[in-house]
Image (spheres, coloured by chain):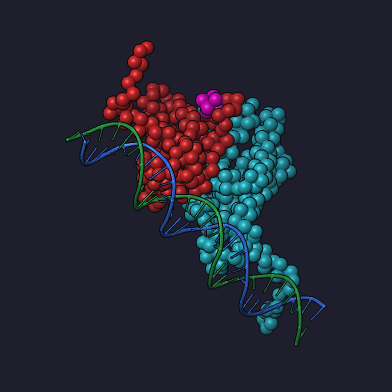
Chain colours: A red, B cyan, C blue, D green
Amino acid sequence: MEQAQSPFRTAQQKLDERDAKRRALLIAAAQMFNLRGFHATSLDDVAASLGISKPTIYHYLGNKEQVLVECLTIGLEQLFAAANEANREPGTGLERLRKFLCRNAEINMGVFGRCVILSGDENLSPEGARKLRAMKRRVDDAMRALIVEGVKDGSIAPVDPKVAAFALAGAVNWSARWFRADGALSAEEMALQLVDFLTVGFAPR
Amino acid sequence: MEQAQSPFRTAQQKLDERDAKRRALLIAAAQMFNLRGFHATSLDDVAASLGISKPTIYHYLGNKEQVLVECLTIGLEQLFAAANEANREPGTGLERLRKFLCRNAEINMGVFGRCVILSGDENLSPEGARKLRAMKRRVDDAMRALIVEGVKDGSIAPVDPKVAAFALAGAVNWSARWFRADGALSAEEMALQLVDFLTVGFAPR
DNA sequence: AATATTATATACTGATGAGTAGATTGCATT
DNA sequence: AATGCAATCTACTCATCAGTATATAATATT
Protein backbone atom coordinates (compact mmCIF):
# COMPACT_ATOMS: atom_id res chain seq x y z
CA MET A 1 0.00 0.00 0.00
CA GLU A 2 2.86 2.37 -0.77
CA GLN A 3 1.62 5.52 -2.55
CA ALA A 4 -1.99 4.76 -1.66
CA GLN A 5 -3.38 7.82 -3.38
CA SER A 6 -2.03 10.95 -4.96
CA PRO A 7 -2.88 14.11 -3.01
CA PHE A 8 -3.36 15.88 -6.32
CA ARG A 9 -6.88 15.47 -7.53
CA THR A 10 -7.85 15.10 -11.13
CA ALA A 11 -10.36 17.45 -12.72
CA GLN A 12 -13.04 14.79 -12.41
CA GLN A 13 -12.32 14.28 -8.74
CA LYS A 14 -12.67 17.97 -8.17
CA LEU A 15 -16.01 18.11 -9.90
CA ASP A 16 -17.15 15.17 -7.81
CA GLU A 17 -15.93 16.86 -4.67
CA ARG A 18 -17.80 20.02 -5.50
CA ASP A 19 -20.92 17.99 -6.09
CA ALA A 20 -20.51 16.14 -2.83
CA LYS A 21 -20.22 19.43 -0.98
CA ARG A 22 -23.28 20.79 -2.71
CA ARG A 23 -25.20 17.70 -1.80
CA ALA A 24 -24.06 17.77 1.83
CA LEU A 25 -25.25 21.34 1.98
CA LEU A 26 -28.65 20.43 0.62
CA ILE A 27 -29.03 17.57 3.06
CA ALA A 28 -28.09 19.75 6.02
CA ALA A 29 -30.50 22.44 4.85
CA ALA A 30 -33.36 20.01 4.23
CA GLN A 31 -32.93 18.45 7.65
CA MET A 32 -33.08 21.82 9.30
CA PHE A 33 -36.03 22.95 7.21
CA ASN A 34 -37.85 19.77 8.21
CA LEU A 35 -37.06 20.30 11.86
CA ARG A 36 -37.73 24.01 12.25
CA GLY A 37 -39.48 25.12 9.10
CA PHE A 38 -38.07 27.14 6.21
CA HIS A 39 -38.51 30.64 7.59
CA ALA A 40 -37.28 29.72 11.04
CA THR A 41 -34.06 28.31 9.60
CA SER A 42 -31.29 30.79 8.91
CA LEU A 43 -28.57 30.02 6.44
CA ASP A 44 -26.12 31.01 9.15
CA ASP A 45 -27.40 28.07 11.19
CA VAL A 46 -27.20 25.68 8.27
CA ALA A 47 -23.65 26.80 7.60
CA ALA A 48 -22.72 26.46 11.26
CA SER A 49 -24.07 22.91 11.37
CA LEU A 50 -21.46 22.05 8.72
CA GLY A 51 -18.71 24.08 10.33
CA ILE A 52 -18.60 26.64 7.52
CA SER A 53 -19.80 30.21 7.04
CA LYS A 54 -22.81 31.58 5.19
CA PRO A 55 -20.99 33.03 2.17
CA THR A 56 -19.78 29.54 1.38
CA ILE A 57 -23.38 28.49 0.85
CA TYR A 58 -23.78 31.36 -1.59
CA HIS A 59 -20.72 30.08 -3.38
CA TYR A 60 -22.55 26.82 -4.10
CA LEU A 61 -26.14 27.98 -4.36
CA GLY A 62 -27.74 31.20 -5.53
CA ASN A 63 -29.96 32.18 -2.63
CA LYS A 64 -32.14 30.77 0.10
CA GLU A 65 -35.06 30.04 -2.17
CA GLN A 66 -32.83 28.12 -4.52
CA VAL A 67 -31.64 25.99 -1.63
CA LEU A 68 -35.23 25.02 -0.97
CA VAL A 69 -36.07 24.57 -4.65
CA GLU A 70 -33.15 22.17 -5.07
CA CYS A 71 -34.25 20.14 -2.06
CA LEU A 72 -37.79 19.94 -3.37
CA THR A 73 -36.63 19.06 -6.85
CA ILE A 74 -34.56 16.15 -5.56
CA GLY A 75 -37.54 14.86 -3.59
CA LEU A 76 -39.90 15.23 -6.52
CA GLU A 77 -37.48 13.49 -8.85
CA GLN A 78 -37.43 10.54 -6.50
CA LEU A 79 -41.21 10.48 -6.79
CA PHE A 80 -41.09 10.66 -10.61
CA ALA A 81 -38.65 7.79 -10.61
CA ALA A 82 -41.03 5.80 -8.42
CA ALA A 83 -43.88 6.49 -10.85
CA ASN A 84 -41.82 5.42 -13.85
CA GLU A 85 -40.66 2.31 -12.07
CA ALA A 86 -44.23 1.36 -11.22
CA ASN A 87 -45.26 1.93 -14.82
CA ARG A 88 -42.49 -0.21 -16.27
CA GLU A 89 -43.37 -3.06 -13.94
CA PRO A 90 -45.56 -5.89 -15.26
CA GLY A 91 -48.74 -6.88 -13.44
CA THR A 92 -52.22 -5.58 -12.84
CA GLY A 93 -53.09 -1.99 -12.05
CA LEU A 94 -53.59 -3.00 -8.45
CA GLU A 95 -50.11 -4.45 -8.15
CA ARG A 96 -48.50 -1.44 -9.78
CA LEU A 97 -50.47 1.02 -7.70
CA ARG A 98 -49.40 -0.80 -4.56
CA LYS A 99 -45.80 -0.71 -5.69
CA PHE A 100 -46.03 3.02 -6.35
CA LEU A 101 -47.70 3.75 -3.03
CA CYS A 102 -45.05 1.80 -1.17
CA ARG A 103 -42.16 3.66 -2.76
CA ASN A 104 -44.00 6.91 -2.34
CA ALA A 105 -44.41 6.32 1.38
CA GLU A 106 -40.77 5.32 1.76
CA ILE A 107 -39.62 8.45 -0.03
CA ASN A 108 -41.83 10.59 2.20
CA MET A 109 -40.02 9.20 5.21
CA GLY A 110 -36.66 10.34 3.78
CA VAL A 111 -35.07 13.79 4.04
CA PHE A 112 -35.99 15.23 0.67
CA GLY A 113 -39.37 13.55 0.51
CA ARG A 114 -40.27 14.97 3.88
CA CYS A 115 -39.16 18.37 2.66
CA VAL A 116 -41.58 18.13 -0.28
CA ILE A 117 -44.45 17.31 2.04
CA LEU A 118 -43.65 19.62 4.91
CA SER A 119 -42.90 22.67 2.82
CA GLY A 120 -45.98 23.99 1.09
CA ASP A 121 -45.52 26.44 -1.74
CA GLU A 122 -46.02 29.37 0.62
CA ASN A 123 -42.25 29.52 1.02
CA LEU A 124 -41.62 30.09 -2.66
CA SER A 125 -41.83 33.02 -5.05
CA PRO A 126 -44.78 32.96 -7.45
CA GLU A 127 -42.68 31.42 -10.22
CA GLY A 128 -41.14 28.88 -7.88
CA ALA A 129 -44.55 27.95 -6.57
CA ARG A 130 -45.88 27.52 -10.08
CA LYS A 131 -43.08 25.17 -11.10
CA LEU A 132 -43.42 23.22 -7.88
CA ARG A 133 -47.15 22.81 -8.29
CA ALA A 134 -46.63 21.57 -11.84
CA MET A 135 -44.24 18.91 -10.61
CA LYS A 136 -46.55 17.84 -7.80
CA ARG A 137 -49.31 17.68 -10.33
CA ARG A 138 -47.33 15.20 -12.40
CA VAL A 139 -46.98 12.89 -9.42
CA ASP A 140 -50.66 13.14 -8.67
CA ASP A 141 -51.52 12.46 -12.31
CA ALA A 142 -49.36 9.35 -12.26
CA MET A 143 -51.26 8.10 -9.24
CA ARG A 144 -54.65 8.75 -10.80
CA ALA A 145 -53.57 7.10 -14.03
CA LEU A 146 -52.60 3.96 -12.14
CA ILE A 147 -55.97 3.93 -10.39
CA VAL A 148 -57.87 4.36 -13.67
CA GLU A 149 -55.86 1.54 -15.21
CA GLY A 150 -56.63 -0.74 -12.32
CA VAL A 151 -60.32 0.04 -12.44
CA LYS A 152 -60.27 -0.75 -16.16
CA ASP A 153 -58.54 -4.10 -15.80
CA GLY A 154 -60.80 -4.97 -12.86
CA SER A 155 -58.01 -5.32 -10.31
CA ILE A 156 -59.21 -2.20 -8.47
CA ALA A 157 -62.74 -1.57 -7.23
CA PRO A 158 -64.73 1.05 -9.18
CA VAL A 159 -63.73 4.10 -7.13
CA ASP A 160 -63.64 7.79 -8.00
CA PRO A 161 -59.98 8.24 -9.01
CA LYS A 162 -59.84 11.78 -7.72
CA VAL A 163 -61.16 10.98 -4.25
CA ALA A 164 -59.10 7.81 -4.06
CA ALA A 165 -55.93 9.63 -5.08
CA PHE A 166 -56.45 12.33 -2.43
CA ALA A 167 -57.10 9.77 0.28
CA LEU A 168 -54.16 7.57 -0.65
CA ALA A 169 -51.79 10.50 -1.10
CA GLY A 170 -52.81 11.81 2.29
CA ALA A 171 -52.19 8.49 3.97
CA VAL A 172 -48.72 8.05 2.47
CA ASN A 173 -47.75 11.72 2.77
CA TRP A 174 -48.71 11.99 6.39
CA SER A 175 -45.89 9.62 7.28
CA ALA A 176 -43.59 12.61 6.72
CA ARG A 177 -45.03 13.97 9.96
CA TRP A 178 -44.97 10.98 12.25
CA PHE A 179 -42.41 8.47 11.03
CA ARG A 180 -39.29 8.18 13.20
CA ALA A 181 -36.29 6.41 11.73
CA ASP A 182 -35.38 5.12 15.19
CA GLY A 183 -38.70 3.31 15.69
CA ALA A 184 -39.39 -0.42 15.70
CA LEU A 185 -40.15 -0.69 11.98
CA SER A 186 -38.00 0.36 9.06
CA ALA A 187 -39.38 2.72 6.43
CA GLU A 188 -39.97 -0.15 4.00
CA GLU A 189 -41.79 -2.28 6.57
CA MET A 190 -43.89 0.65 7.67
CA ALA A 191 -44.74 1.54 4.07
CA LEU A 192 -45.89 -1.99 3.34
CA GLN A 193 -48.13 -2.11 6.39
CA LEU A 194 -49.67 1.20 5.43
CA VAL A 195 -50.38 0.06 1.89
CA ASP A 196 -51.76 -3.28 3.03
CA PHE A 197 -54.20 -1.46 5.25
CA LEU A 198 -55.23 0.96 2.53
CA THR A 199 -55.75 -1.84 0.04
CA VAL A 200 -58.51 -3.55 2.01
CA GLY A 201 -59.86 -0.75 4.23
CA PHE A 202 -61.13 -1.33 7.71
CA ALA A 203 -64.56 -2.85 7.09
CA PRO A 204 -64.49 -6.62 7.56
CA ARG A 205 -64.96 -8.67 4.40
CA MET B 1 -89.83 50.45 14.99
CA GLU B 2 -89.35 53.71 16.88
CA GLN B 3 -86.37 53.47 19.26
CA ALA B 4 -85.08 50.33 17.55
CA GLN B 5 -82.07 49.93 19.79
CA SER B 6 -80.35 51.98 22.38
CA PRO B 7 -76.90 53.15 21.34
CA PHE B 8 -75.73 52.58 24.89
CA ARG B 9 -74.56 49.02 25.33
CA THR B 10 -75.01 46.98 28.44
CA ALA B 11 -72.07 45.40 30.22
CA GLN B 12 -72.96 42.05 28.69
CA GLN B 13 -73.10 43.50 25.21
CA LYS B 14 -69.68 44.94 25.70
CA LEU B 15 -68.24 41.64 26.80
CA ASP B 16 -69.81 40.00 23.79
CA GLU B 17 -68.42 42.69 21.55
CA ARG B 18 -64.96 42.20 22.94
CA ASP B 19 -65.25 38.48 22.35
CA ALA B 20 -66.48 39.00 18.82
CA LYS B 21 -63.49 41.21 18.08
CA ARG B 22 -61.11 38.69 19.57
CA ARG B 23 -62.66 35.98 17.47
CA ALA B 24 -62.53 38.05 14.27
CA LEU B 25 -58.88 38.64 14.99
CA LEU B 26 -58.19 34.94 15.38
CA ILE B 27 -60.03 34.09 12.18
CA ALA B 28 -58.13 36.71 10.21
CA ALA B 29 -54.85 35.49 11.67
CA ALA B 30 -55.61 31.81 11.04
CA GLN B 31 -56.58 32.50 7.44
CA MET B 32 -53.35 34.33 6.85
CA PHE B 33 -51.27 31.69 8.63
CA ASN B 34 -52.90 29.05 6.44
CA LEU B 35 -52.23 31.02 3.28
CA ARG B 36 -48.67 32.18 3.88
CA GLY B 37 -47.39 30.26 6.87
CA PHE B 38 -46.86 31.49 10.40
CA HIS B 39 -43.43 33.05 10.05
CA ALA B 40 -44.24 34.70 6.75
CA THR B 41 -47.29 36.40 8.26
CA SER B 42 -46.66 39.64 10.11
CA LEU B 43 -49.10 40.91 12.69
CA ASP B 44 -48.99 44.22 10.87
CA ASP B 45 -50.52 42.44 7.87
CA VAL B 46 -53.15 40.70 9.97
CA ALA B 47 -54.07 44.02 11.55
CA ALA B 48 -54.19 45.75 8.17
CA SER B 49 -56.54 43.07 6.81
CA LEU B 50 -59.00 44.14 9.51
CA GLY B 51 -58.35 47.84 9.08
CA ILE B 52 -56.73 48.20 12.48
CA SER B 53 -53.16 48.60 13.75
CA LYS B 54 -50.81 46.11 15.36
CA PRO B 55 -50.99 47.40 18.94
CA THR B 56 -54.70 46.67 18.88
CA ILE B 57 -53.88 43.00 18.44
CA TYR B 58 -51.66 43.19 21.49
CA HIS B 59 -54.57 44.70 23.36
CA TYR B 60 -56.56 41.50 22.77
CA LEU B 61 -53.83 38.89 22.72
CA GLY B 62 -50.50 38.61 24.45
CA ASN B 63 -48.08 38.00 21.63
CA LYS B 64 -47.74 36.34 18.26
CA GLU B 65 -47.30 32.86 19.67
CA GLN B 66 -50.45 33.23 21.72
CA VAL B 67 -52.36 34.16 18.60
CA LEU B 68 -51.29 30.88 17.06
CA VAL B 69 -51.90 28.90 20.23
CA GLU B 70 -55.46 30.19 20.46
CA CYS B 71 -56.14 29.27 16.85
CA LEU B 72 -54.77 25.78 17.39
CA THR B 73 -56.71 25.36 20.62
CA ILE B 74 -59.97 26.23 18.92
CA GLY B 75 -59.27 23.72 16.16
CA LEU B 76 -58.30 21.02 18.62
CA GLU B 77 -61.37 21.63 20.72
CA GLN B 78 -63.49 21.08 17.66
CA LEU B 79 -61.74 17.75 17.26
CA PHE B 80 -62.29 16.82 20.92
CA ALA B 81 -65.95 17.64 20.50
CA ALA B 82 -66.10 15.39 17.46
CA ALA B 83 -64.50 12.56 19.44
CA ASN B 84 -66.97 12.97 22.31
CA GLU B 85 -69.88 13.11 19.93
CA ALA B 86 -68.77 9.91 18.25
CA ASN B 87 -68.39 8.23 21.62
CA ARG B 88 -71.85 9.24 22.83
CA GLU B 89 -73.42 7.93 19.66
CA PRO B 90 -74.97 4.45 19.69
CA GLY B 91 -73.92 1.85 17.14
CA THR B 92 -71.00 -0.40 16.34
CA GLY B 93 -67.37 0.68 16.50
CA LEU B 94 -67.36 0.86 12.72
CA GLU B 95 -70.27 3.26 12.61
CA ARG B 96 -68.79 5.47 15.30
CA LEU B 97 -65.35 5.49 13.73
CA ARG B 98 -66.90 6.51 10.44
CA LYS B 99 -68.78 9.29 12.14
CA PHE B 100 -65.63 10.53 13.83
CA LEU B 101 -63.59 10.40 10.62
CA CYS B 102 -66.26 12.34 8.77
CA ARG B 103 -66.39 15.14 11.31
CA ASN B 104 -62.63 15.12 11.55
CA ALA B 105 -62.28 15.60 7.80
CA GLU B 106 -64.86 18.38 7.79
CA ILE B 107 -63.08 20.20 10.59
CA ASN B 108 -59.80 19.90 8.72
CA MET B 109 -61.35 21.73 5.81
CA GLY B 110 -62.29 24.68 8.06
CA VAL B 111 -60.09 27.60 9.10
CA PHE B 112 -58.98 26.45 12.53
CA GLY B 113 -58.78 22.79 11.59
CA ARG B 114 -56.53 23.64 8.67
CA CYS B 115 -54.42 25.70 11.03
CA VAL B 116 -53.91 22.68 13.29
CA ILE B 117 -52.79 20.55 10.38
CA LEU B 118 -50.72 23.08 8.46
CA SER B 119 -48.86 24.43 11.46
CA GLY B 120 -46.53 21.90 12.95
CA ASP B 121 -45.14 22.51 16.41
CA GLU B 122 -41.99 24.06 14.94
CA ASN B 123 -43.66 27.45 15.27
CA LEU B 124 -44.10 27.16 19.01
CA SER B 125 -41.91 27.56 22.05
CA PRO B 126 -40.92 24.31 23.79
CA GLU B 127 -43.75 24.63 26.33
CA GLY B 128 -46.28 25.52 23.65
CA ALA B 129 -45.15 22.59 21.54
CA ARG B 130 -45.48 20.24 24.49
CA LYS B 131 -49.03 21.31 25.26
CA LEU B 132 -49.98 21.11 21.60
CA ARG B 133 -48.55 17.62 21.22
CA ALA B 134 -50.47 16.50 24.29
CA MET B 135 -53.71 17.74 22.79
CA LYS B 136 -53.00 16.14 19.42
CA ARG B 137 -52.20 12.97 21.27
CA ARG B 138 -55.65 12.96 22.85
CA VAL B 139 -57.27 13.12 19.42
CA ASP B 140 -55.10 10.32 18.16
CA ASP B 141 -55.90 8.22 21.23
CA ALA B 142 -59.60 8.72 20.66
CA MET B 143 -59.22 7.44 17.12
CA ARG B 144 -57.24 4.40 18.19
CA ALA B 145 -59.74 3.64 20.93
CA LEU B 146 -62.57 3.64 18.41
CA ILE B 147 -60.63 1.30 16.17
CA VAL B 148 -59.89 -1.10 19.03
CA GLU B 149 -63.55 -1.08 20.02
CA GLY B 150 -64.63 -1.88 16.50
CA VAL B 151 -62.15 -4.71 16.20
CA LYS B 152 -63.47 -6.12 19.47
CA ASP B 153 -67.12 -5.99 18.46
CA GLY B 154 -66.24 -7.42 15.06
CA SER B 155 -67.47 -4.46 13.03
CA ILE B 156 -63.91 -3.57 12.01
CA ALA B 157 -61.41 -5.94 10.41
CA PRO B 158 -58.52 -7.07 12.65
CA VAL B 159 -56.07 -4.28 11.79
CA ASP B 160 -53.13 -2.85 13.70
CA PRO B 161 -54.74 0.17 15.44
CA LYS B 162 -51.56 2.20 15.26
CA VAL B 163 -50.99 1.75 11.55
CA ALA B 164 -54.68 2.17 10.81
CA ALA B 165 -54.88 5.37 12.84
CA PHE B 166 -51.87 6.86 11.05
CA ALA B 167 -53.24 5.99 7.64
CA LEU B 168 -56.73 7.27 8.39
CA ALA B 169 -55.50 10.42 10.07
CA GLY B 170 -53.28 11.10 7.08
CA ALA B 171 -56.14 10.70 4.64
CA VAL B 172 -58.49 13.01 6.52
CA ASN B 173 -55.80 15.51 7.48
CA TRP B 174 -54.46 15.88 3.99
CA SER B 175 -57.72 17.51 2.96
CA ALA B 176 -56.41 20.62 4.75
CA ARG B 177 -53.98 20.93 1.86
CA TRP B 178 -56.14 20.34 -1.17
CA PHE B 179 -59.76 21.07 -0.32
CA ARG B 180 -61.18 24.24 -1.89
CA ALA B 181 -64.43 25.58 -0.50
CA ASP B 182 -65.37 26.82 -3.98
CA GLY B 183 -65.19 23.35 -5.55
CA ALA B 184 -68.03 21.15 -6.76
CA LEU B 185 -68.50 19.29 -3.49
CA SER B 186 -69.18 20.74 -0.05
CA ALA B 187 -66.97 19.80 2.87
CA GLU B 188 -69.55 17.33 4.22
CA GLU B 189 -70.00 15.61 0.87
CA MET B 190 -66.27 15.42 0.33
CA ALA B 191 -65.71 14.03 3.81
CA LEU B 192 -68.27 11.29 3.29
CA GLN B 193 -66.74 10.23 -0.02
CA LEU B 194 -63.33 10.11 1.58
CA VAL B 195 -64.56 7.95 4.46
CA ASP B 196 -66.52 5.64 2.16
CA PHE B 197 -63.39 5.02 0.19
CA LEU B 198 -61.29 4.40 3.27
CA THR B 199 -63.85 2.00 4.71
CA VAL B 200 -63.59 -0.51 1.89
CA GLY B 201 -60.16 0.21 0.39
CA PHE B 202 -59.43 -0.12 -3.28
CA ALA B 203 -59.11 -3.86 -3.72
CA PRO B 204 -62.27 -5.34 -5.30
CA ARG B 205 -64.34 -7.56 -3.01
C1' DA C 1 6.92 33.61 -12.59
C1' DA C 2 2.59 35.91 -13.46
C1' DT C 3 -2.14 35.65 -13.63
C1' DA C 4 -6.70 33.67 -13.07
C1' DT C 5 -9.89 30.81 -10.59
C1' DT C 6 -11.75 28.44 -6.60
C1' DA C 7 -12.90 28.13 -1.89
C1' DT C 8 -13.26 30.22 2.01
C1' DA C 9 -13.52 33.91 5.69
C1' DT C 10 -14.77 38.48 8.24
C1' DA C 11 -17.41 42.24 8.48
C1' DC C 12 -20.72 44.92 6.72
C1' DT C 13 -25.79 46.86 4.79
C1' DG C 14 -30.55 47.08 4.64
C1' DA C 15 -35.04 45.31 5.34
C1' DT C 16 -38.36 43.37 8.00
C1' DG C 17 -41.03 42.66 11.85
C1' DA C 18 -41.96 41.64 16.99
C1' DG C 19 -42.89 44.05 20.68
C1' DT C 20 -43.30 48.72 23.50
C1' DA C 21 -43.87 53.71 25.01
C1' DG C 22 -46.77 57.06 25.33
C1' DA C 23 -50.61 59.93 23.60
C1' DT C 24 -55.55 60.32 22.78
C1' DT C 25 -60.37 59.70 23.03
C1' DG C 26 -64.51 58.24 25.04
C1' DC C 27 -67.19 55.84 28.28
C1' DA C 28 -67.98 54.44 33.32
C1' DT C 29 -67.80 54.88 38.11
C1' DT C 30 -67.49 57.37 42.23
C1' DA D 1 -66.56 67.04 38.19
C1' DA D 2 -62.84 63.95 38.75
C1' DT D 3 -60.71 59.88 38.15
C1' DG D 4 -60.06 55.50 36.06
C1' DC D 5 -60.31 52.08 32.48
C1' DA D 6 -60.95 50.40 27.56
C1' DA D 7 -59.70 50.84 22.91
C1' DT D 8 -57.12 52.68 19.79
C1' DC D 9 -53.37 55.20 17.44
C1' DT D 10 -48.42 56.93 15.92
C1' DA D 11 -43.88 56.41 16.38
C1' DC D 12 -40.36 54.25 18.14
C1' DT D 13 -36.47 50.24 19.59
C1' DC D 14 -34.07 46.26 18.91
C1' DA D 15 -32.97 41.78 17.01
C1' DT D 16 -32.55 38.85 13.28
C1' DC D 17 -31.19 37.55 8.92
C1' DA D 18 -30.74 37.58 3.72
C1' DG D 19 -27.58 38.99 0.89
C1' DT D 20 -22.94 41.54 -0.40
C1' DA D 21 -18.25 43.68 -0.45
C1' DT D 22 -13.96 42.54 0.04
C1' DA D 23 -9.83 40.03 1.68
C1' DT D 24 -6.90 35.89 1.60
C1' DA D 25 -4.95 31.66 0.65
C1' DA D 26 -4.45 27.86 -2.28
C1' DT D 27 -4.54 25.75 -6.60
C1' DA D 28 -4.51 25.92 -11.80
C1' DT D 29 -3.22 27.86 -16.21
C1' DT D 30 -0.28 30.15 -19.34
Relative to residue A51, is residue D6 depicted above or below? Answer: below
Q: Position of residue A56 (x, y in %)?
A: 40, 41
Q: Is residue A177 left or right of residue B73?
A: left
Q: Is residue A87 above or below residue B56?
A: above
Q: Main secondary structure of the magenta part?
A: helix
Q: Quadrant of the C terminus of chain A?
A: top right
Q: Quadrant of the N terminus of chain A?
A: top left
Q: Is residue B195 left or right of residue A138?
A: right
Pick the residue in front: A173 or B67. Answer: B67
As rendered, which of A187 and C7 lies closer to the eye?
C7
User: Which region shows up in magenta?
Assistant: A186-193
Residue beneath the point at 66% across and 40% down: B137
**Is residue A135 in view?**
no
Confirm whether the magenta stretch covers residue A113: no
- Does residue B31 sit above or below B157 in this rendering? below
Residue at position x 34%, y 15% in the image: A3
Q: Between residues A193 and A53, which one lies in front from this camera angle? A: A53
Would residue B136 appear left or right of D14 to someone viewing this image?
right
Q: Is residue A127 visible?
A: yes
Q: Is residue A187 magenta?
A: yes
x%, y% of residue A37?
52, 44
Please name the residue shown 49% across and 30% down the image. A106
For image coordinates 34% across by 29% down, the residue present is: A16
- Snapshot quadrant of residue A198: top right
Residue A26's place in the image compared with B44, above or below, is above
* Residue B62 image point, x, y percent: 65, 59
In x, y percent, where is residue A191? 52, 28
Numbered disc total? 0
